[in-house]
C-alpha cells in the first residue's frame, strides 16, 4: 500500500521583533506582556528579564514572532504602551526587525578596529549595514575602498570644529545612520553629536590612571599586571559613559611595550565588536549611566 504524502502548505517567512521595557519592579509584568502578545497572535521566541533590587527597577527583552499576528502593528504597539502605562514603565523600545541598522564608523590612523568591524561584517557576524566611514585623515581610504564603502575625510581644527561637525551630522542624516562607532577616532566629539546619535567608543582601560599619550609605555614603566579595553556609549562626560563591554589580559615581567600594545589591540578589537553586536541586536538597556546587556 502506497502512502500519499500530506498536502504541502505555503510557508510564511517569520517576521520577528524585539521589545525592550524598563520600569519599577512589580508583580505581573512578565505575564502581562506574554498575555498581550498571545492575544494578538504573536509567539515568544525567547525572553530575558532582570531586576535591579537596589534601584527597584525591572528590565525585560522579548524576541517575538509576529508573522501570524491577528491585528496590525499599530494596534499591538498601542497595547504595549497601555501595559507600560499600567506599570508606570518608561516608553517601550520596539524594533520590528524589518530594517537593518545603518552604521557610520569614524577612524583616524589606527586601522585594527576598522579591519575587525569590516571583516566580521563580511563574515555575517554583524547584521547591519556599514554605510560610510568618516575620518580626519586620508590614511585608511584604501581599506574602505577595498570593501566598497564610501570614505569621507573631514579635516578638524579647533577653529573649524563646529563647522566640520555640522557637515558630518548632515551627512549622517542624509544616510539615515542609526549608530556611530568610534573605532579609535582620535578626536573629541561634542555634546550635540552624542545627543543626535548613539555613539559607541573604544579605549584602553588604563583610565584614569594613564590619561593622555603613550599609555602602554607608562603602564609598562609601572609594571602593570593587567591591561584591558572598554567599550561604552559616548556622552558629554567623555570616557565616563555607560559601559557596554570590557575585557582584560594578564601581563608579566617578560612583556615588553610592544607586547602590551599587541595584546591591547586584540582586546580593543574584540571588545568593540562585542559591544556593537549587542547594540544592533537590541540587547542593551541604559539606565543610571549603566547598561543591562542581555545574552546574545
Image (cartoon, helix red, strand yellow):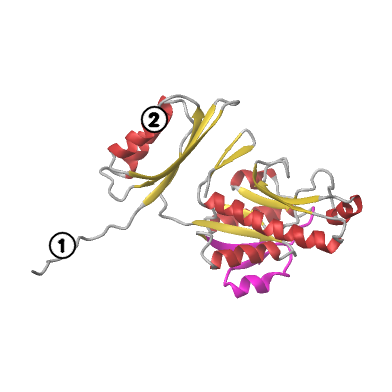
Q: Residue at the spot x=88%, y=55% of the render?
A: 220
Give coordinates of residue 130: x percent, y percent: 56, 62
Q: Is residue 88 visible?
A: yes
- Residue 11 magenta-highlighted: no
In the rendered view, does 239 fall on the left or right side of 277?
right
In the rendered view, does 179 fall on the left or right side of 256?
left
Quick one: label 1 or label 2, which is nearer the N terminus? 1
Give coordinates of residue 64: x percent, y percent: 38, 46
Q: Which residue is mark 2?
A: 83
Q: CA distance from mark 1 to mark 2?
A: 42 Å
Q: Which residue is mark 1?
A: 6
Whether tag 1 and tag 2 are in contact, CB under 8 A, the answer is no
Looking at the image, residue 141 lies above or below residue 58: below
- Depth check, mark 1 against mark 2: the one in front is 1
Label 1 residue SS: loop
Q: State which region is magenta.
A: 129-158
Question: In this view of the protein, which residue sits in the foreground, 136 or 102?
Answer: 102
Q: Residue at the spot x=27%, y=48% of the render?
A: 68
Give coordinates of residue 15: x percent, y percent: 35, 53
The numbered disc on residue 121 is none
In the rendered view, does 51 fall on the left or right side of 152?
left
Q: Residue at the spot x=83%, y=47% of the render?
A: 211
Label 2 residue SS: helix
Give coordinates of residue 112: x percent, y percent: 70, 64
Amino acid at each position: 500500500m502506497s502512502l500519499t504524502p500530506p498536502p504541502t502548505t505555503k510557508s510564511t517567512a517569520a517576521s520577528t521583533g524585539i521589545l525592550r521595557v524598563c520600569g519599577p519592579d512589580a508583580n505581573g509584568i512578565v505575564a502581562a506582556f506574554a498575555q498581550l502578545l498571545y492575544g494578538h497572535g504573536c509567539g515568544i521566541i525567547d525572553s530575558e528579564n532582570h531586576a535591579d533590587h537596589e534601584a527597584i527597577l525591572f528590565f525585560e527583552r522579548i524576541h517575538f514572532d509576529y508573522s501570524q499576528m491577528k491585528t496590525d502593528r499599530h494596534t499591538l504597539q498601542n497595547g504595549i504602551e497601555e501595559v507600560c502605562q499600567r506599570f508606570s514603565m518608561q516608553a517601550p523600545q520596539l524594533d520590528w526587525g524589518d530594517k537593518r541598522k545603518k552604521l557610520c564608523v569614524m577612524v583616524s590612523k589606527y586601522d585594527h578596529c576598522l579591519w575587525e568591524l569590516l571583516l566580521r561584517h563580511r563574515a555575517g557576524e554583524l547584521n547591519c549595514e556599514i554605510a560610510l566611514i568618516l575620518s580626519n585623515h586620508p590614511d585608511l581610504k584604501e581599506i574602505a575602498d577595498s570593501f566598497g564603502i564610501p570614505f569621507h575625510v573631514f579635516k578638524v581644527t579647533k577653529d573649524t570644529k563646529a563647522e566640520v561637525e555640522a557637515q558630518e551630522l548632515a551627512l549622517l542624516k542624509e544616510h539615515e545612520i542609526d549608530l556611530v562607532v568610534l573605532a579609535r577616532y582620535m578626536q573629541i566629539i561634542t555634546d550635540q553629536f552624542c545627543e543626535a546619535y548613539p555613539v559607541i567608543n573604544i579605549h584602553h582601560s588604563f583610565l584614569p590612571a594613564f590619561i593622555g599619550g603613550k599609555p602602554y609605555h607608562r603602564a609598562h614603566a609601572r609594571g602593570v599586571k593587567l591591561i584591558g579595553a572598554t567599550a561604552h556609549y559616548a556622552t558629554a562626560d567623555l570616557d565616563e559613559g555607560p559601559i557596554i563591554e570590557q575585557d582584560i589580559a594578564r601581563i608579566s615581567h617578560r612583556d615588553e611595550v610592544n607586547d602590551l600594545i599587541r595584546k591591547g589591540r586584540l582586546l580593543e578589537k574584540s571588545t568593540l565588536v562585542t559591544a556593537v553586536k549587542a547594540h544592533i541586536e537590541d540587547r542593551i538597556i541604559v539606565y543610571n549611566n549603566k547598561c543591562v546587556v542581555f545574552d546574545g
